[in-house]
Image (tube, helix red, strand yellow):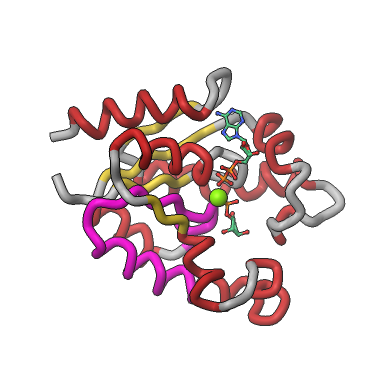
Amino acid sequence: MSQPVFLVGPMGAGKTTIGKQLAQQLGYPFKDSDREIEDRTGADIPWIFDVEGEAGFRQREVVVLADLATQGQLVIATGGGIVMREENRDCLKQSGIVFYLTASTEQLLERTAKDKRRPLLQVADPESRIRELLAIRDPLYAEVATYIINTEKRPPRQVAQEMADLVRNHK
Ligand SMILES: Nc1ncnc2c1ncn2[C@@H]1O[C@H](COP(=O)(O)OP(=O)(O)O)[C@@H](O)[C@H]1O
Ligand SMILES: O=C(O)C1=C[C@@H](OP(=O)(O)O)[C@@H](O)[C@H](O)C1
Ligand SMILES: [Mg+2]
């Protein structure tokens, strides 16, 4: 099977962390769309949001996803907003297996609290922001998902194990 495996879901769901573990367990190369955008731009995400706005970042994200999706057998962790563009949703649905990683708002808040590199959460009330984004995005994640995986109460390695079994048995 040569199709890519994508991880989607909200900020703090564990896409980057679990994606690396999954890639290791499957023996696939790992890519993170955020990292790929940073490498190609030569700047970090806060800089891109500052200088080009969210719209500029989203444009870069479309290009990177379309590119990574055609590179065959990869595990690809995406950014939480990837599903906002219809062309990205079409690309995800047509290109491979898509895991929607979930966690409670409390967990997402806790997991994202220390890391200041997520521009959309640098607000006075990040909990409300997480809820607002989820209300909009949850149906979009569900629309593209092949599998929905809860990431709570288990370490990333164990979540990745369950996902690796699903990929191996996927027809
Ligand atoms: N299953 C899990 N249980 C506990 N902590 C987790 C789990 N998955 C991820 N984390 C932690 O949550 C934080 C955010 O994870 P990250 O992979 O960056 O999320 P995302 O890429 O979805 O925004 C990291 O500190 C990571 O170690
Ligand atoms: O949800 C979003 O819109 C974003 C999520 C981030 O990725 P993670 O989901 O990996 O944190 C990153 O792409 C950017 O800060 C925007
Ligand atoms: Mg990430």
Percent position of residue 156, x then y = 51, 29
- Up-down relation of residue 119 to residue 75 (above or below): below
The structure residue drawn at horizontal position 32% and vertical position 69%, both measured from the top left corner, is 67
Nearest to the observer: residue 115 or residue 95: 115
Q: Which residues are magenta?
A: 60-84
Left/right of residue 122 with respect to residue 9 in the rendered view: right
In the image, 24 versus 142, the foreground residue is 24
Q: Is residue 143 above or below residue 123?
A: above
* Residue 163: quarter of image: top left
- In the shown orientation, is residue 86 left or right of residue 129? left
State ligand 2's quadrant. bottom right
Q: Specify the quadrant that holds the C terminus.
A: top left
Which residue is located at x 46 percent, y 56 percent?
A: 32
Q: Position of residue 164 (x, y in %)?
A: 31, 31
Depth check, front residue: 152 or 43 = 43
Residue drawn at x 56%, y 72% is 57
* Side (left or right) of 32 relative to 88: right
